[in-house]
């Protein structure tokens, strides 16, 4: 497993825990809220992956 994959998995786990704690704290049982949080986590993960991969390419080019 690449370090980037581990980062993404940790990112998803932390965001899911945060969203669950927020919803429990405010007693939010709205499905739309959960959908919004899930979409944010999904797009955040996608953005994170793209950032990590571009950085890896950049460093590989710099090393050569």
Image (tube, rainbow, N blue to C red):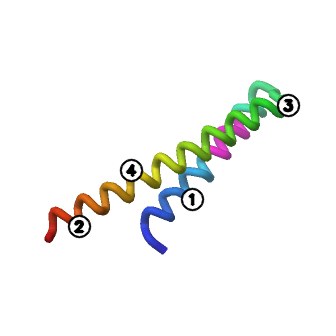
Distance of label 3 from label 4 (alpha carbons): 33 Å
Return the residue found at the far bottom: 1
Pointer 1 residue: 9
| Disc nearest the viewer among 1 and 4 | 4
Category of crowding for the residue at label 4, using alpha-carbon neighbours closer than 10 angstroms: few (below 14), some (14–19), many (at least 20): few
For marks 1 and 3 on the same chain, the one whose residue lies earlier in the sequence: 1
Residue at 23% in and 62% down: 59
Quarter occupied by the C terminus: bottom left
| Whole-percent x, y for residue 22 in the image | 70, 32
For marks 2 and 1 on the same chain, the one whose residue lies earlier in the sequence: 1
Distance of label 2 from label 3 (alpha carbons): 46 Å
Category of crowding for the residue at label 2, using alpha-carbon neighbours closer than 10 angstroms: few (below 14), some (14–19), many (at least 20): few
Category of crowding for the residue at label 3, using alpha-carbon neighbours closer than 10 angstroms: few (below 14), some (14–19), many (at least 20): few
Asked whether the beta carbons under mark 2 and mark 3 sit within 8 Å of each other, the answer is no
Label 4 element class: helix
| Disc nearest the viewer among 3 and 4 | 4
**Going by the image, does 31 lie left or right of 45?**
right
| Whole-percent x, y for residue 60 in the image | 23, 67
Label 3 element class: loop
Label 1 element class: helix
Pointer 3 residue: 29
For marks 3 and 4 on the same chain, the one whose residue lies earlier in the sequence: 3
Q: Range of the magenta residues?
A: 15-21
For marks 2 and 3 on the same chain, the one whose residue lies earlier in the sequence: 3
Asked whether the beta carbons under mark 3 and mark 4 sit within 8 Å of each other, the answer is no
Residue at 75% in and 30% down: 33
Distance of label 1 from label 4 (alpha carbons): 15 Å
| Residue 51 numbered tag | 4
Q: Quadrant of residue 40?
A: top right
Q: Nearer the viewer, residue 42 or 21?
A: 42
Q: Nearer the viewer, residue 20 or 51?
A: 51
| Residue 60 numbered tag | 2
């Amino acid at each position: 497993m690449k370090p980037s994959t581990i980062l993404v998995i940790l990112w998803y786990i932390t965001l899911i825990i945060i969203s669950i704690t927020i919803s429990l704290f405010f007693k939010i049982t709205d499905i739309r809220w959960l959908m919004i949080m899930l979409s944010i986590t999904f797009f955040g993960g996608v953005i994170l992956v793209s950032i990590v991969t571009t950085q890896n390419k950049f460093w590989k080019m710099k090393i050569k």
